[in-house]
Image (cartoon, rainbow, N blue to C red):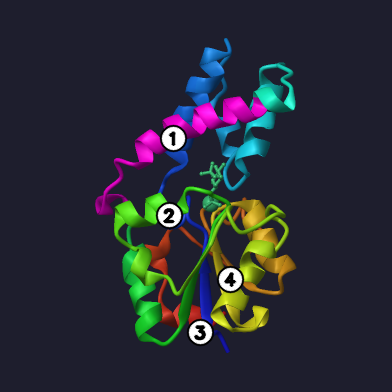
Amino acid sequence: DIKACLFDLDGVIVDTAVYHYKAWKRLANSLGFDFTEEQNEHLKGVSRVRSLQLILGWGGITKTEAEQTELATEKNNWYVEMINKMTPAEVLPGAKEFLEGCRSAGIKTALGSASKNSGIILKNTGIEHLFDAIVDGNHVTAPKPDPEVFIKGAEALGVLDTECVVFEDAIAGIEAAKNGGMKAVGIGSPQILTQADLVISGLDQMTMEKLREL
Ligand code: B16
Ligand code: MG
């Protein structure tokens, strides 16, 4: 029986990837190179530090650990400037409705995001109250595909891992769910999210019936 739904943030509830992209691009440009939108796909669901390392690699640039910390902070300051302006209109179609639907059906909800900025995003989009538990980049040490973020979510909700369904847009996130013994619903393309139990284009396509059939 499914007792809880765990949600990734970026790409599932909101589209903050566009802000991450703008901020990383600004940083790369300031270092004298650029990267494509296609390369940016590889940064989805990946931690801040790891994203920076990938980008520096694309630019063929080596930086010390101290320099990396400084660059990551610079990027984050630009990113936070943008997410500080987010509004409730930026919640992706169907996300709020599905979260509300879960709660009225007695299904618990938790956030399971790699972001350390989830608090700002949830507050500005006005959906913080729809989560029974919030687990994000501030609470985890092992990045997805390690299941830590979702296992901590299940723990916080007081349910078994096997009673959870994870909603994820990233391959590593789907893998994390499966590694945790959970059901996984992919948001995106079935060709890419091949390990998911079900793939939909967005939460506006999700129903309680589809949840029960998992
Ligand atoms: P921050 P998710 C992820 O969010 C983003 O997809 C990824 O691009 C970002 O680098 C990561 O959060 C860390 O974010 O810099 O705000 O801590 O998809 O796990 O909700
Ligand atoms: Mg994501």
Q: How many marks?
A: 4
| Measured Cα–Cα span from mark 2 to mark 1 | 14 Å
Numbered disc in front, either 2 or 3:
2
The overriding secondary structure of the stretch rendered in magenta is helix
Residue for badge 3: 212
Residue range (magenta): 68-92
Q: Position of residue 150 (x, y in %)?
A: 62, 67
| Measured Cα–Cα span from mark 2 to mark 4 | 16 Å
Residue drawn at the location 70% of the way across and 54% of the way down: 141
| Residue 102 found in image quarter | bottom left
Q: Cβ of disc 1 within 8 Å of ligand 1?
A: yes
Q: Earlier in the sequence, mark 3 or mark 4?
A: 4
Q: Amino acid at mark 3?
A: Arg
Q: Position of residue 66 (x, y in %)?
A: 69, 26
Task: Report the residue that reaches farthest toward the front.
Answer: 66
Residue for badge 4: 153
SS category of the residue bearing label 4:
helix
Q: Amino acid at mark 2?
A: Gly
Residue for badge 2: 119
SS category of the residue bearing label 1:
helix
| Measured Cα–Cα span from mark 3 to mark 4 | 20 Å
Residue for badge 1: 79
Q: Amino acid at mark 4?
A: Gly
Numbered disc in front, either 3 or 1:
1
Q: Amino acid at mark 1?
A: Tyr
Numbered disc in front, either 2 or 1:
2
Mark 2 neighbour density, 10 Å: few (under 14) some (14–19) many (20 or more):
few
